[in-house]
Image (cartoon, rainbow, N blue to C red):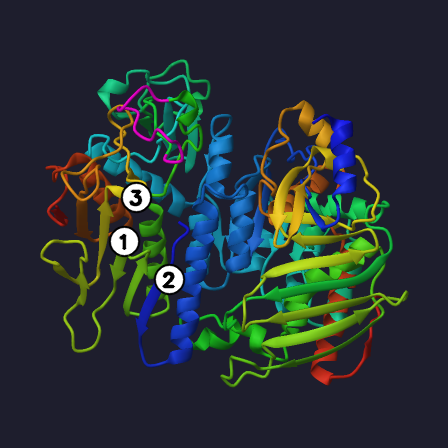
Amino acid sequence: MGTRFELVLHGDDDVQLRSAGECALAEIERLHTQLTNFSDDSLLTHINRTAAKAAVRLDAETFALFQDALHVYRASDGAFDCTLGTGMDCVLLNRGTHSIRFDRHVVRDHGSGIKDQGPGIGDDCSEKDERANILLIPIPRSPIPDPRSNNPDPRSSNPDPRSLIPDPILDLGAIAKGHALNCAAGILRDHEVSCALLHGGTSSVLALDAPPGESAWRIALANHPQRLTIDLCNAALSVSCTLGDRRHNVGHIVDPRGQGSWVRGQGPPGLMGERYSAVLGPSARLADAWSTALIVLGHRPATLGAEWQSWLW
Amino acid sequence: MSDPDRRSFIAQTAGALAGFALLPGVDFRPPARERAARKVAVIGIGRQGRAILDELRKLDAVEIAAVCDVVPTRLKAGTDSAPGAEAIADYRELLTRRADVEAILIATPTHLHRDIALAALQASRHVYCETPLAHTAADARAIAEAAARASTTFRSGLLARTNPIYQRARSLVRSDSVRDVVSLYAQSQRKTSWRFPAPDASLNQAFNWRLDPDLSIGLAGELGTHQFDVMSWLRNKPPIRVQGSGGIRLHNDGRTIPDTIALQMSWDDGVVLNYQATLANSFGGTYETLHGTNAALRLAGTHGWMFKEADAATQGWEVYATVQQFHQDEGIVLVADATKLAEQGRLKEGAGLQHPPLYYALADFITAIQGGESAGATAAHGLQATLIGIAANEAVRSGRVTDISTS
């Protein structure tokens, strides 16, 4: 995650609030160490290193994270995809064993989108006992530009193969902050902290009950042309933007459905243009995934349920 | 630049201290799965218990059959972390009803270790017990004596001894690379209240045993024990004397356990460990440093470095290094087992462990159960470390020089 998280807690007992807040922050730190791609000893690195050879057993919470990622992948028709990478054909999530596995031998037909694993599919898979209730995410094989490269947009010319990002296979950068906020909020609730506002990097926000005398936490969207203000109470908000590195005019969201191109906005400022999305709903983790998907799609899909509010500009 | 050229280049330009990353050897192998996985249970599902579950899940040789805690929310956290494991509130029920569970991992508060460890050993289970083993010398001795009598395996949770980077460092201490030890330094710094909110008020005291002077051996015992053991293990002998001080620098909330301590711990050859721990400042985190006449070692859990003195002879293996900057000094990132790694084309791999240190300790425990070669800390090692931690805490409490008895 590599970003600053802040908690605002309200209550009567300072000592209790501090210790609850410390537990919530400790949980965020724990998740950071588990889900980062920048550490050799993280769980995600372990998955990326191991899952092509053997199933990796997961805890219920991490399994739910991947299930949500899969849900939004399916509902957005592939616009959100945490498997940006190369080399694998699919990711298998086994509900029976709470495990994750990469497989090179199942489902070559990426065009048909996600598939539920059922009997008879992928008979060449070697571990049939793991087949029940497996869900498949086909991984795009399109070249992915590397923002560190001098040639970040492969559409502009033939991309240098060395500029393709070889690893990691799974990247939870677009959803981990929301996941951490959900887990931290759970800890606060467990410790009877009911009035709180949490955010990660200011782009993912989660609110519990409103402050005394208020109906909600009031959040302003700084980049919205009308400086839209959103009331947040027992809900999560995630914002996303096309532009990642303003100095170099480099985007940070790749369209996983196409040729691995950066998602571009319309018009100035910047050559790539800017596009913003904001999504409000019951889960910070899902809000994160959907705000990214909306940036890629450029419109609100019909599959985004009525419990979600969204803005795109 | 050819290798001989590079060697002379390094020898001639080593005016600044050079930092060498200590990579683990490539020989570590996790325990292989036998015909059936070994069934284990974890007792105590607080933060450390969950960390144990996180690492156990990575071991194919293990099936987490049960989790145990008296607090329902923690029990649920256990089953969330180990799907399929049975949730059992009472450890005695676990020991009597789940005869198929052959190993018990104890991660309860320190003062509860004794009864559980003795019951598990009495029930002929293998035991992994977090360290410090106990909050009193009598309890720690009781555990060690029971482990010595038992026919099953007992391992103490002293992570350095199974950490491949620390093992590499120890081999350097025993070679000419470090040479004579000049001094030692270690710290554990974090900013936290050390308070844990309980799900209801009746559990407040139980959850905050670390702040209860009757049950806790303070920062020296709970944090320092592991770091004192690093030094005892690296030096191959325990310290003999300790003096210390402590106070409350930040968390003035009615507690009497100091949130900041400083210790001086002496060995029989006059070498001194300067140690500090605090809950009021996180700068630098947790690490240990050993200063030798030829080089210094800094060890920080998943990472380790060696800083060579300018006049230290080149050992040869440094020529495979990658350069790394350490503040004002040019560091050379060296790779342990460089020749072997170079043959495998893996010289440029990362400079840290592939798993948290806890993983290696648990892998070692399972290997020991399987009858394999084990470097893990025995009950005797755990007892020694615990007695040093208790003496250090006593030095902080009393403000007096305290002799350390490790027998």
In the image, residue A153 lies in the stretch drawn in magenta: yes
Magenta stretch: give its range: A147-159
Position of residue B266 in the picture relative to residue B357 (left or right): right
Separation of marks 3 and 2 at Cα, in angstroms: 31 Å
Which quarter of the image is occupied by the N terminus of chain B? top right
The earlier-in-sequence mark between 3 and 2 is: 2
Residue at (20, 30) in percent of width and height: A77
Q: Chain of mark 3?
A: A
The residue where tag 1 is placed is A203
The lab-note entry on whether marks 3 and 2 share a chain reads yes
Residue A90 can be seen in this image: yes
Mark 3 Cα shell of 10 Å, populated few (<14), some (14-19), many (≥20): some
Helix, strand or loop at mark 3:
strand
Q: Chain of mark 1?
A: A
Residue A244's label in the rendered image is 3
Helix, strand or loop at mark 2:
helix
Residue B341's label in the rendered image is none
In the image, residue B363 lies in the stretch drawn in magenta: no
Amino acid, disc 3:
Gly
Mark 1 Cα shell of 10 Å, populated few (<14), some (14-19), many (≥20): some
Residue at (22, 73) in percent of width and height: A211
Helix, strand or loop at mark 1:
loop
Amino acid, disc 2:
Ile
Separation of marks 3 and 1 at Cα, in angstroms: 13 Å
The earlier-in-sequence mark between 3 and 1 is: 1
CB within 8 Å, label 3 to label 2: no
Image depth: mark 3 or mark 2 in front: 3
